[in-house]
């Protein structure tokens, strides 16, 4: 029997962990096995042809919110061409809706609900022996009598999970993000999430080390841990992080962590981690107490903000903080407060997401109570609620776009902290006013490069004084055209040449010529020098494009 495991990843750089787990559970029984990964933007006709060329007996799709629509198109078209082909769907987007999807889509033969590592091999054995998958936990199907049957899923004991990766994968994964989990389940129960509520089950630590050793030896550039709360067991988390540091070559690591439960031992360790090796994604979602209560999310904001500030001060770990717009009890004033408090922690990235009401969640049962208007198709985003109108949510989307353009891009890393330094200035209002300007200037309709982003900002701000100086520093850091447009004042030339010659070691391994093209003396006004803490007597900031920052202050 030929089996094809398939998914549509959201980007080329992504890879599917789920398919590799399934492959490991079935490859010894079904060696005629093919693992196909596409992207959601790939041409569906081409994908249909590629799968059809293999003529699988069983075609299994791993389904997520981002790929369910094209997956259903593929399933329908392939079933029309190959009516004998058995089509199986699994994954978080289909499990909770198994009965509904089977009733609506005759192309689907089976849906695996929950974890598939035991259910899927059992289903394949049933298909091969032409049996109905009666009593296989987690498998739903159409019966001969045209009704839907199925058995609720069971969790897979962690010691029964195979290692998902094998040595022959590594060349193909060398330029991709590789996902790995050391545990399943989450101790929290946020009402909008499908992952919460299950007891956390940990893989044996020696198994984790063996799996990671394989990936580290292959020098995988970025390993993303998809444990829902990586540090829910602090001692274990620390052991794994220490192992990663001790055994890595060039690999970097991304973790989803809960920042308010970081203890002093962990914080002491984290502040010693060399720069740019760890990335943390920290879900704040909201700081509004009634909202947190409604979504059943436990979070100690005081502790979280203190810990984030401590990590941020060290600046060795990339900090990505999340907020969600559209949550219950979060009106315009509440989202403004959350936004301002979180962005004032100066995360390297602030993601303003929008609530998705996923089928099967506790939140989905409250649609009427919360006055939610929800998009009918995935990702089921909230379009309006009792607390935010459709227009307000649209404006929040515009703010989110400007947040990406000007904050998360790092374009204004020097300018924005100055603009917002006065505690009475609301960063949220600053973005709101910029959004109104962009809207009236028709700027949201087209994409903009970095040059255009600076140009639009300067038109809007008409910068002078320190703001103008800081924008020049940010342009020196970020604009590809800056070197060509930069004019060194004639009276600076001799001094600048001397400085570069005598400080060349600072810019190694660049040669003198290369440093000349990537390090710039930017003249600043006295008030800007004071704001930046420049030593008395200096008049110029030395901006290093490669390091993206001011590296010195000098007098020319
Ligand atoms: S949102 Fe995060 S913390 Fe909350 S239940 Fe889901 S995985 Fe757990």
Image: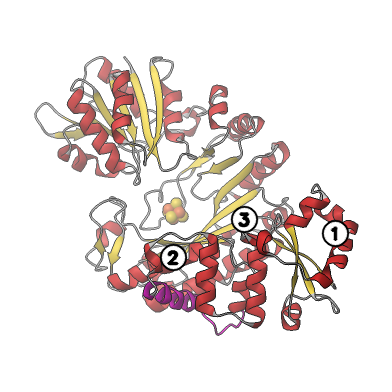
Picture quarter containing residue 128?
A: top left
- The answer to whether the residue bearing label 2 lies less than 8 angstroms from the nearest atom of ligand 1 is no
- Quadrant holding the C terminus: bottom right
Q: Residues within 10 Å of mark 3 (few under 14, many from 20)?
A: some
Q: Secondary structure at mark 1?
A: helix
Q: Residues within 10 Å of mark 2 (few under 14, many from 20)?
A: many
Would residue 23 appear left or right of 305 to someone viewing this image? left
Indicate which disc residue 318 carries.
3
Q: Residues within 10 Å of mark 1 (few under 14, many from 20)?
A: some
**Of 131 and 235, the residue lying toward us:** 131
Query: Where in the figure is residue 316, as x and y percent of width and height?
Result: 69, 56
Residues drawn in magenta: 421-440
* Furthest residue in direction left, as rendered: 145
Query: Does 502 appear above or below 454?
Result: above
Pointer 2 residue: 400
Q: Residue at x 73, y 56 (%)?
A: 518
Single out the mark in the foreground, 2 or 3. Answer: 2
Pointer 1 residue: 500
């Amino acid at each position: 029997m030929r089996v094809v495991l398939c998914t549509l990843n959201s980007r080329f750089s992504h890879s599917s962990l789920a398919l590799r787990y399934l492959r490991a559970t079935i490859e010894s029984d079904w060696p005629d096995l093919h693992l196909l990964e596409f992207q959601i933007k790939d041409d569906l006709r081409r994908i249909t042809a590629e799968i059809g060329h293999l003529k699988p007996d069983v075609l299994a799709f791993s389904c997520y919110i981002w790929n369910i629509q094209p997956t259903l198109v593929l399933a329908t078209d392939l079933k029309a061409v190959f009516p004998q082909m058995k089509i199986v769907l699994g994954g978080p987007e289909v499990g909770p809706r198994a009965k509904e999807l089977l009733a609506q889509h005759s192309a689907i033969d089976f849906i695996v609900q929950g974890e598939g590592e035991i259910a899927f091999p059992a289903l394949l054995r049933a298909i091969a022996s032409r049996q109905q998958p009666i009593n296989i936990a987690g498998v739903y199907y159409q019966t001969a009598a045209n009704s839907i049957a199925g058995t609720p899923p069971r969790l897979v004991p962690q010691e029964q999970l195979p290692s998902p990766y094998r040595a022959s994968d590594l060349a193909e994964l060398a330029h991709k993000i590789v996902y790995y989990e050391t545990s399943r389940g989450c101790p929290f129960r946020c009402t909008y999430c499908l992952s919460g509520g299950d007891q956390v089950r940990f893989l044996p630590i020696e198994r984790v080390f063996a799996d990671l050793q394989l990936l580290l030896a292959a020098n995988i550039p970025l390993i993303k841990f998809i444990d829902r709360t990586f540090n829910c067991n602090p001692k274990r988390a620390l052991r794994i992080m220490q192992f990663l540091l001790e055994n890595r070559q060039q690999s970097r690591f991304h973790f989803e962590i809960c920042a308010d439960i970081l203890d002093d031992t962990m914080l002491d360790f984290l502040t010693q981690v060399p720069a740019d090796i760890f990335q943390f994604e920290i879900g704040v979602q909201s700081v509004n107490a009634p909202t947190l209560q409604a979504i059943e999310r436990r979070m100690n904001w005081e502790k979280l903000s203190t810990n984030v500030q401590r990590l941020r001060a060290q600046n060795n770990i990339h900090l990505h903080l999340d907020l969600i717009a559209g949550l219950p009890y979060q009106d315009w004033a509440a989202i403004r407060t959350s936004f301002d408090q979180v962005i004032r922690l100066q995360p390297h990235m602030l993601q303003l997401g929008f609530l998705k009401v996923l089928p099967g969640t506790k939140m989905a049962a409250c649609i009427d109570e919360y006055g939610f208007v929800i998009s009918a198709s995935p990702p089921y985003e909230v379009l309006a609620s009792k607390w935010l109108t459709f227009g307000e949510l649209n404006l929040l989307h515009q703010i989110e776009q400007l947040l990406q353009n000007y904050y998360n891009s790092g374009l204004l890393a020097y300018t924005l902290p100055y603009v917002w330094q006065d505690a009475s200035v609301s960063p949220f209002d600053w973005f709101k006013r910029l959004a109104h300007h962009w809207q009236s200037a028709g700027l949201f309709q087209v994409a903009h490069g970095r040059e255009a982003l600076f140009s639009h900002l300067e038109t809007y701000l008409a910068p002078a004084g320190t703001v103008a100086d800081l924008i020049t520093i940010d342009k020196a850091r970020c604009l590809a055209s800056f070197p060509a447009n930069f004019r060194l004042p004639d009276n600076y030339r001799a001094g600048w040449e001397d400085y570069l010659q005598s400080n060349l070691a600072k810019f190694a391994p660049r040669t003198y010529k290369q440093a000349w093209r990537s390090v710039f003396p930017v003249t600043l006004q006295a008030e800007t020098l004071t704001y930046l803490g420049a030593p008395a007597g200096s008049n110029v900031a030395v901006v290093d494009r490669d390091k993206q920052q001011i590296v010195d202050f000098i007098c020319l």
